[in-house]
Image (tube, helix red, strand yellow):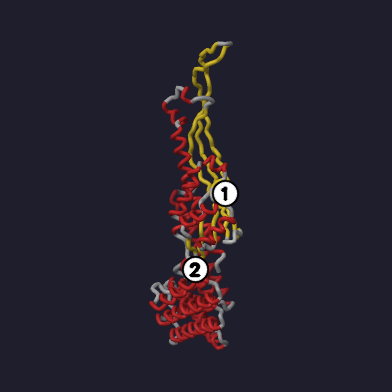
Amino acid sequence: MLSVRARTLFPLMLLIASACASAEDRFNEGLTLQSQGRYVDAVYRYAEAIEKDRELVEAREAMLAAGDSAVMFAMDEADDMERRGDPVAAAGRYQTIDQMLSRIRQVGERLTLPPDYSDIRRTLFNTAIDWQMFEGDRASQEGRWDEAVVMYRRARGNFLPSRSQVEASYDAETRVLLDWAGIELEDDRPRSAYDLAQQALEVRNSPTRETVLSARDVQEDALAAGTIVVAVVPVIAEAGVRDWLGGEFEVALDADLNLDHWTRPPPFVAMADPVILRTELRGLLRGQATQSPLLVGRALDLIGADLGVMIRLSGIDVVEEDVDRVEYEAVVQRNIRQGARRTTVMDTVPYYTLDGMLTYHVESDIIVVDPSGREVNRFTASSTQSGPFTRGEFDGDPGQLDLPTNLEVFFDPTVIADQMRIIEGDVLEELAVAIAVGTYDQVLAGIR
């Protein structure tokens, strides 16, 4: 049997042997790669071998030799690529060598570089940056706006640009975005023009005053050309929805929309005055309760709005889930008729307590119409909200039950109403957001 000391040392010896074997494997892989002329890959394998065995001198010597070869071949390849007119690919070869040199330093070694390495590298990086700027200018002149933006961003993102080179790329990108925005505005695409002007403002963290003024002019012109005036008529509900939620729910939803969501429209949407709209609608309806696209369209024409929005609460589902139902018994008095006489008797009756989750799902139909009364769009907004509930069930008057104190809450109508009010409040809030977001999305979808 092995001693305690032997049992402790044996796994450790296996671990050391495994690590050495692994270092040897990486070293051998490096030799193979080096023999194939894949010098950069070989350097990485040698570095892994050194990390696993710091005393593996052969790996250090081989890594430096492979690194020397990698630098020599990369410089030759870069020179050839530049002569063929591809300075970006040529500069990329130097980036590969930079990464390799960093890996060599991580294992405590340094490579001796040719004396002119840094100067050649910097010159080639500058050439690559200039080429990207040139290609960006050419793409801009030919109306290839996306390509121009990409080239300018690459010019300052790669090859360690100087501060002046970064500033030049910022200026070029800002200029092309504003030029592009102007073309979009001329082509009757105001939203696109507005967004491009905003991008121009965001090229720099602190845009110049000239950029701010130019972008603002484009955005003001875009808003003037593309803003749509929207009028929203009062929320109405189907009879079944109103029977369950009560008429105050649609009034509260309408108030929430008017006091919050309709007061914060996105760019290109302006909301018509709801008071003026409702005044005109009352005159058109003349006491009728039914809204129609045709009547709403006539009201739009009267108040100068471009689109009208009709909101109808169209459906509701209320479901009790995960219900825990407990049966109890109570003794109550009952009046029964025996012939011509009425007699009071004591009777044992069941009643129940229930608790679980109450889920509301409310749907609304939203119709967008134009001044001619034509339906231009329609969508559905909905809300599903849940909350805990407790209630009691009894086939009769709960006041007859001699309820224990802890069960009285199950038959308290104020408690039940409060539970429902909380869930309905959550439904109202979510539904208002869904209606507002959906409406704005539909309106903006019609603006290019």
Extreme residue in the bottom direction: 83
Q: Residue 81 or 322: which is nearer the viewer?
A: 322
Q: Residues within 10 Å of mark 2 (few under 14, many from 20)?
A: many
Q: Which residue is mark 1?
A: 290
Give the distance between the C-alpha atoms of the residues marked 2 and 1, in whole angstroms: 79 Å
Q: Considering only vertical position in the picture, is 437 above or below 40?
A: above
In the image, what residue occupies the spot 58% across and 59% down?
Answer: 369
Horizontal side, residue 195 vs residue 372: left or right: left
Q: Which residue is mark 2?
A: 48
Name the amino acid, label 2.
Glu
* Quadrant of residue 102 within the rendered picture: bottom left
Q: Residue 71 or 34: which is nearer the viewer?
A: 71
Name the amino acid, label 1.
Thr
Helix, strand or loop under label 2: helix
Q: Considering only vertical position in the picture, is 340 above or below 320?
A: above
In the image, what residue occupies the spot 53% across and 40% down?
Answer: 244
Q: Quadrant of the C terminus?
A: bottom right
The label shown at residue 250 is none
Residue 271 placement (x, y as % from top left): 48, 60
Q: Residues within 10 Å of mark 1 (few under 14, many from 20)?
A: few
Residue 115 placement (x, y as % from top left): 43, 87
Residue 229 placement (x, y as % from top left): 50, 63
Q: Is residue 386 visible?
A: yes
Q: Is residue 161 visible?
A: no
In the image, what residue occupies the spot 46% across and 67% down?
Answer: 51
Helix, strand or loop under label 1: loop
Residue 81 placement (x, y as % from top left): 56, 85
